[in-house]
Image (cartoon, grey):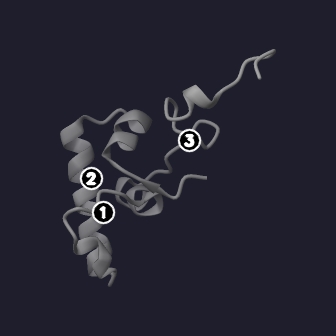
Amino acid sequence: MIQVVDKNDLMELIGYSETQASKLIRKAKSQLVQEGFEWYKNKRIGRVPIITVESILGFQIQLKNDIIEGNLQSAVMTEGEK
């Protein structure tokens, strides 16, 4: 299962715009810093735990086969390929 997400993942998974996804990531980072995770104070950190995002949104994000669609498309083999 995917443990962390970035803004692009959120845009693909729940259909948020880039601005909405970025704001959600910033809010999650702020919440994590308040909880004592100083690592997330770094402005270059763009991935946050999915459970933090879910707690902010108030619902569980459903992942399709635990893979964010599109990320592993080139890794899929069809029958007869080697």
Residue at horizontal 22%, vertical 74%?
41
User: Dot 1 corresponds to which residue?
Assistant: 28
- The CA span between labels 3 and 1 is 19 Å
Which secondary structure lies at badge 3? Answer: loop
Give the vertical position of 82 relative to 6 (above or below): above
Q: Give the residue pinned by disc 3.
A: 63
Q: Within 10 Å of the Cα at label 2, are there few (<14), some (14-19), or many (20+) other Cα atoms? A: many
The answer to which quarter of the image holds residue 4 is bottom left
Q: CA distance from mark 1 to mark 2?
A: 6 Å
Q: CA distance from mark 2 to mark 3?
A: 18 Å
- Label at residue 14: none
Q: Nearer the viewer, residue 45 or 12?
A: 45
Say whether marks 1 and 2 touch (CB < 8 Å). yes
Q: Amino acid at mark 1?
A: Ala
Residue depicted at x 41% and y 61%: 55
Residue 46 placement (x, y as % from top left): 29, 57
Taking the image as shown, residue 34 lies to the left or right of residue 1, namely left
Mark 2 residue element: helix
- Residue 40, how many percent across, how many down? 29, 71
